[in-house]
Amino acid sequence: MKILYSAIDQTVPGTKGGSVHVVGVAEGLAALGHEVHALVTPGPEPPRPGPVRWIAMRPPLGSSHLRLTRTGAIADLVDRLRPDVIMERYHNFGGEAILAAKAAGAIAVLEVNAPVIDHRGSRKALLDRALIVQPMRRWRRRLCRLADVIVTPSPAILPPGLPADRVAVLEWGADTERFRPDADGARPFARPPVATVAIFAGAFRSWHGAVHLVRAMRTLHARGRTDIGAVLIGDGPELPRVRDEAAGLSHVVFTGALPHDQMPAALASADVGAAPFDVAAHAPLSLGFYWSPLKVFEYMAAGLPVVAPAVDRIPLLVGDGREGVLYDPAAPDALAAALERASDPAVRATLGAAARTRAVRDYSWSAHCR
């Protein structure tokens, strides 16, 4: 089939999860033999060579809030390409590709990664209600009704009343060919001289919980476990705070954001993958843990046992004592204890091998795209 994939507010190549997701889906569909044309904001470097036809299209002024104004440009492209399927990565102010699909008679697929419904106390919902007719809520619901298929990791973030046969519940994934225990490439950081390195890769925002990893390192070192260190990869508004928390700690390395092409080698240089999510720090997660966390799937593909909190859907993604070590985030020092447990070489080897097996079976992009 010929597929047009609209993700014009995502930069490709890029270091953020949205960019990684778009590349994974586009390449996964192309690997199945489909002709894939993907609309994205171009990054500073060209995408890596491959079968996907990348098309540069930025939202006006670089703002995702103005995506809908690209409807005409996408409709013109649809007239030229004549795709069988048109996919759109959901945004509150999107809909440009879904409208083009309906006008052209193509199958309309809406990929929903973020809540379509509002959480309690949402400022967006308060503004919408102040406009009396609630235009944002009405538009989002209409968009879901227009889609022939909705792909999401969590139906809890969709409006009620959608036909179940139009909702495909799928986890996102990892490139299990590139992320593997023996991944090639130069290590993009100096590994701390310790027996066990826990790695954190992701955005430095409060709900990703990097500060909790640093505090756990301090607890472990106070107990004399200076044989456990940490590498933290990424950038974001919480980075200065996390660096301050790490002041005086040995064997804790910050790399900043890295190109995603360097991440397979980075994870292959570590021993444990840390995903210390803090769901209480992000109000939309009151709807449930709707994320399908790329970092977790990439850790698993790299053969790393995952250390994460035992909240909501996470135990379904990572089995405690099977592919990782889960902990109670409300219990004092539970993260430190989980890291200590995962640092045992025999435990680490068993959990890491199982994590790799499950990632290949359940969380590859090819499995997602099938």
Image (cartoon, rainbow, N blue to C red):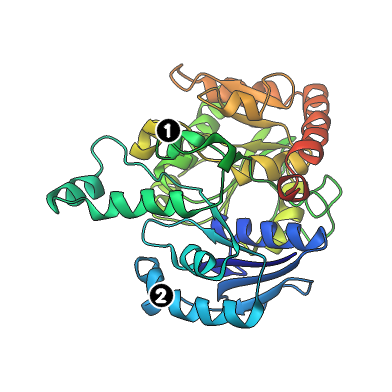
Q: Which mark is residue 267?
A: none
247 versus 285 height, above or below: below
Seen in the image, is 176 located left or right of residue 296? right
Residue 224 visible in the shown view: no
At mark 1, the secondary structure is: helix
Q: Residue at x 18, y 46 (%)?
A: 126
Which residue was labeled with disc 2? 62
Q: Residue at x 51, y 25 (%)?
A: 312
Question: Residue 85 at what x, y percent from top left?
Answer: 64, 63
Q: Identity of the amino acid at label 1?
A: Val
Question: Residue 242 at what x, y percent from top left?
Answer: 44, 45
Q: CA distance from mark 1 to mark 2?
A: 29 Å
320 versus 50 height, above or below: above
52 versus 229 height, above or below: below
Q: Residue 260, located in which quarter of the rendered image?
A: bottom right
265 versus 39 height, above or below: above
Which residue was labeled with disc 1? 279
Q: Quadrant of the N terminus?
A: bottom right
Q: Residue 86, located in which quarter of the rendered image?
A: bottom right
Q: Identity of the amino acid at label 2?
A: Gly
Dot in front, 1 or 2: 2
Seen in the image, is 315 located left or right of residue 130? right
Residue 137 visible in the shown view: yes
At mark 2, the secondary structure is: helix
